[in-house]
Amino acid sequence: MAPPRILLCGDVLGRLNQLFKRVNSVNKSAGPFDSLFCVGQFFPDETDRLDELMDYVEGRAQIPLPTYFIGDYGVGAAKVLSAASKNSANQGFKMDGFKICDNLFWLKGSGKFTLHGLSVAYLSGRQLSSGQQFGSYSEDDIDALRAFAEEPGIVDLFLSNEWPSGVTNRAAVSDIPSGMSDSSGSDSTVSQLVAEIKPRYMILSFTYNLHGRRPYSQGDVTNESYHIAGTKGAFYAREPYSNVDAVHVTRFLGLASVGNKEKQKFLHALSPTPSSAMSAAEISTKPPNTTLSPYALADQVDRPKEATKRAGDNAPDSQYWRYDVSNKRQKHGNGDGNKVCFKFISSGSCPRGEKCNFQHDVDAREQFLRGVCLDFIIKGKCEKGPDCNFKHSLQDEGESYSRKRPGSGNNNAIRLKECWFCLSSPNVEIHLVTSIGENFYCALAKGPLVQDHVLLIPVEHLPNTLCLSADGEIELGKFQNSVKMYYKNQGKEAVFFEWISKRGTHANLQAVPVPSSKAAALKDIFNLAAEKLGFEFVTKKFNNNSEGRKWLRTQFDKNLSCFYVELPEGSILSHLVEENEKFPAQFGREVLAGLLNMADRADWRNCTLGKEEETKLAENFKKRFEVFDPSH
């Protein structure tokens, strides 16, 4: 597959007509290009260009290709970004861009995502005082990037708005634009991030006046060796530099602002091969003009990691925890009872493992993945209130997670109102429901792995399907048999699995169809996945579904989380998750995605559809399933 072709741009400053005229020209002569990244201030610095911006935002003018920006400040930023934050399509944990309008996406805060095979990391906004809603980044954004930096793999592009202090160290003096100074307006935090992330390309837009003092700088940071920056009146491409403790080099690129009077380069084309598709030899190749890292002093290059602790760290563990939770929520497991491991919550893993001094809170990690605000999860409140883009409700029955508001009813009523699966809740997506019985209903899965991926959900708010009444168990059996027959009619077999959190979210049993030709491999692939996670399934085979579920109830311990899967040939594989054991909440889906060669669909958030398309799929499923539906 050919490498993606991308365009990079410096400060836009609301000059969208001029930018997209140039983009169309370049696309026609040298394209087509896959996407455009804008670093530096995206919004106007003068009110007279606001109408030009709004023409694109409101659809009167068209954006020619997918465009991503991080400079979320300037005239009109608050209005446009507030509206985008409140859009239901942008709710939840999104790192691949909030949609502003067709082909325009806002990269908010910090994050890491994959686009056209490229690993892209970013830090949006500037380092300003706290309390500003847009245009600045927080300590949480910094900590999240540090967590991503320790994940396996190389970051291809790193985008940031602030200029990294020291980037011109060891650079050829003759190549540095005249008047450019690194003595003011730079950000040491970005320098530290780049040194840790080690992107192949770092991209930013930096602004300084002609006397060499830069009031601010803009840029993008990624875990690969390209750093791209835009300057006011200057274009700067630094020689590649080597990274400490990494074999690949980093390239830094500074871009001028759109429409700059000096007519310096503001648009740059790049066609990098994703690091995931490169050989070890290709990744480690160093051009002859490669310099030492500008962020490490000469006497630090060969110094052990422990001797190069980041400036500003008050404790050696500062990147691992963010919140003191004493007197806020009772923790469980090993580690310091007053602090949680931010690294574990944000990335799902921690290189310290059992040696970590802080809590690895599996339940908090689950809520975080569901798009719940991190402050709300840990502190019980969020100072941003309605302006926060994340959810302020928990799908949980634990008393310590209950959020009783002044003047509200009891906690149970709040829980039912906020639940995604209670039919009486305003949060339930009723357009996905396909049939309703006395005790159970069937609904299409949100972000389905494959077509006809459905959920069997008890009408009553129950923590799992192993605590059903006798009538509920009978009706569940009927739904399962009907789904099996429906899949069988299409030449497929049914796989049922359930993740049971000890905190007791609303139960849902997932049903996924797999081709009959792959059914024989199911047990082996689940066992192989378990082996990689370091556990073994308890396995037993049954002649009928009823006997199997009776056995499951004897295995279940309500004080522990549990995962089980029911296979087409009658085997049931179950696993009780110990108190401090790491277990991915989407394990069942991830295993099936691997079996079906759909690794990119392992996360449901990568598969979400619009409401109109979801409604159409649900109606089509109803028609096909009607003859099998036990509720009819």
Image (cartoon, rainbow, N blue to C red):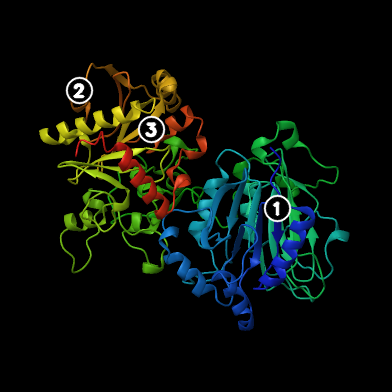
Q: Viewer-proximal residue, 116 or 152? A: 116
Quadrant containing the C terminus is: top left
Q: Which is in the foreground here, disc 1 or disc 3?
A: 1
Q: Which badge, 2 or 1, comes first in the chain's sequence?
A: 1
Residue 598's place in the image compared with 3, above or below, is above
Helix, strand, or loop for circle 1?
loop
Quadrant assignment, res 563: top left
Q: CA distance from mark 3 to mark 2?
A: 20 Å
Question: Dot 1, crowdedness within 10 Å: few (<14), some or many (≥20)?
Answer: many
Percent x, y of residue 263: 82, 71
Q: CA distance from mark 1 to mark 3?
A: 37 Å
The answer to which quarter of the image holds residue 471 is top left
Q: Nearer the viewer, mark 2 or mark 1?
A: 1
> Residue at the left extreme?
470
Give the residue pinned by disc 2. 551
Horizontally, residue 276 falls left or right of residue 326, namely: right
| Quarter of the figure that contains the N terminus | top right
